[in-house]
Each structure stands twice: as structure tokens, then as C-alpha cells.
Image: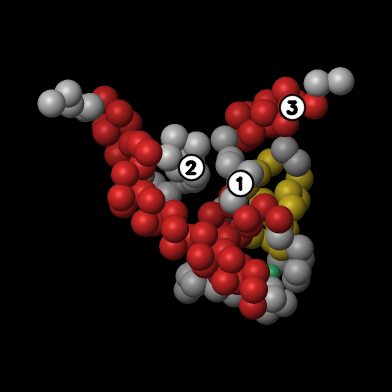
Amino acid sequence: MDTRTSSTAIEDKSGNNRKDPTWKYVHLLKPPNTNDLVCNFCNKVTKGEIYRAKQHLAGRHHNVTMCKRCPTHVREEIQDYMLKKVTAKDFDKTSFPDFEDVERMGDDEDEDEIGANIEVP
Ligand SMILES: [Zn+2]
């Protein structure tokens, strides 16, 4: 059987990048709805896709309750991922075509604008 086709299709359809380590520690409340995620540690439901679930695990955002059962090494892994992501985005996002930039952070319009205004030196 062709397993790789099905997994690729899921990634494309959801628009979420499963390379995000957060996916190891959360699961979907009502698949295929990717908005509501359940924390594997404390079973808290976060309603804001992977971004909000990530903040719950990392404990970095005042709008999100920090996970009280998340092991320290997991929290550090998520925080590290968030840091790298910001750096990569700031540095040059076009170098990371597969890197996670599909999250909804309110900058979708910016991305469109950048894509439409590529200048050739
Ligand atoms: Zn939790």
C-alpha cells in the first residue's frame, strides 16, 4: 500500500505542519477539526489551533493557562522551537519553504504582499 500519499494529503489538507513538536503532546478534540486541541498532560482543551496549544505548553503567554503537568524538558523543547521559528522568520523565511509559516498569527496579509512584490535585482 502507498502510505506516504495519505500522510502527505493530511498535511496539505489541514494546513498544519506536523513537524511542530507540539503535535507530540496534544491531540485533536474532534478530528479533523484542528482548532480544538487537547493537552496530553493535563487534558486541557485549547481553542486556537496549534499556536494556542503551544503557548499552553510553553507557558509563555498571559492569555493562556500554563500547563501544570508539562515536564520541564518538553516545555524547553517547545520554547526552543518557538525561538527558532521567530529567528528563522526574521532571518529569511524564503529559505525555509517547508518551515512552519502556516500558523495563523495575523500576518497572512503580509505574506501575500511579500509574495506579490518579489523584486528582481
Ligand atoms: Zn496541559
Q: Which residue is mark 2?
A: 99
Question: SS at mark 3?
Answer: helix
Foreground residue among 100 and 45: 100
Residue at image point 30% right, 39% down: 110
Q: Position of residue 114 (x, y in %)?
A: 27, 33
Q: Which residue is mark 3?
A: 4
Foreground residue among 73 and 70: 73
The three-letter amino acid code for the residue at tag 2 is Phe
Q: Which of marks 2 and 3 precedes in the sequence? A: 3
The three-letter amino acid code for the residue at tag 1 is Lys
Q: Quadrant of ligand 1?
A: bottom right
| Position above or below: 24 against 15 | below
Question: SS at mark 2?
Answer: loop
Residue at image point 38% right, 51% down: 88
Q: CA distance from mark 1 to mark 3?
A: 15 Å
Residue 74's disc is none
Where is residue 45, by image quadrant? Answer: bottom right
How many discs mark residues in the rendered view?
3
Q: Is mark 3 within 8 Å of ligand 1?
A: no
In which quadrant of the rendered image does the N terminus lie? top right
| Position above or below: 9 against 108 | above
Q: Which residue is mark 1?
A: 19
The furthest residue to the top: 1
Q: Which of marks 1 and 2 precedes in the sequence? A: 1
The three-letter amino acid code for the residue at tag 3 is Arg
Q: Position of residue 65 (x, y in %)?
A: 59, 73
Q: How is the image coloured?
A: secondary structure
Q: CA distance from mark 3 to mark 2?
A: 19 Å
